[in-house]
Amino acid sequence: MDDEVKMMLHAILEEIGGVEERANKRFDTIEKHFDTIENELESLHHEVNACKLERDSIGLLIKKIDQLEKRIEELERKSA
């Protein structure tokens, strides 16, 4: 009976080892997937920041154009 218990225990331990190995492989796959998502998220973060900077620059350019148009209008009135 002692040998039979040892064999069952050995079989159970082997099965647990197999389950652990499959779980570790799955965790590795998930970790790689999360790394990919994290890299893409970082890239998107940089793109969003670039878009915000572009938007701010465009806003400043529009203000400058408005100021220049007003100056031109004033100069045209003065010279007329």
Image (cartoon, rainbow, N blue to C red):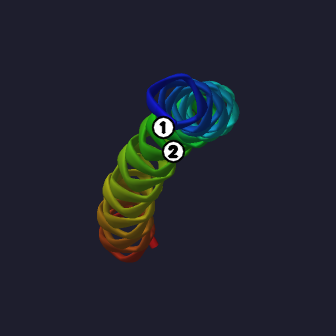
- x, y percentage for residue 55? 45, 58
At x 31%, y 54%, the residue is: 60
Can residue 33 be seen in the rendering of this structure? no
In the image, taking residue 35 as reference, residue 69 lies left or right, namely left
- x, y percentage for residue 73? 42, 73
Question: Residue flagged by tag 1: what amino acid is it?
Answer: Glu
- Judge depth for marks 2 and 1 and give the one in front: 1
Front residue of 62/19: it is 19
Neighbor class of circle 2 (other Cα within 10 Å; few <14, some 14-19, many 20+) is few
Q: For residue 52, which quarter of the picture?
A: bottom left
- x, y percentage for residue 3? 54, 22
- x, y percentage for residue 42? 45, 35
Residue at disc 1, secondary structure: helix
At x 54%, y 40%, the residue is: 34
Which residue is identified by label 2?
Answer: 41
Which residue is identified by label 1?
Answer: 38
Front residue of 57/31: it is 31
In the image, taking residue 69 as reference, residue 63 lies left or right, namely left
Q: Which mark is residue 56?
A: none
Can residue 12 be seen in the rendering of this structure? yes
Front residue of 75/44: it is 44
Label 2 to label 1, Cα distance in Å? Answer: 5 Å
Front residue of 4/56: it is 4
Circles 2, 1 touching at the beta carbon (< 8 Å): yes
Question: Residue flagged by tag 2: what amino acid is it?
Answer: Leu
- Residue 56's place in the image compared with 23, above or below, is below
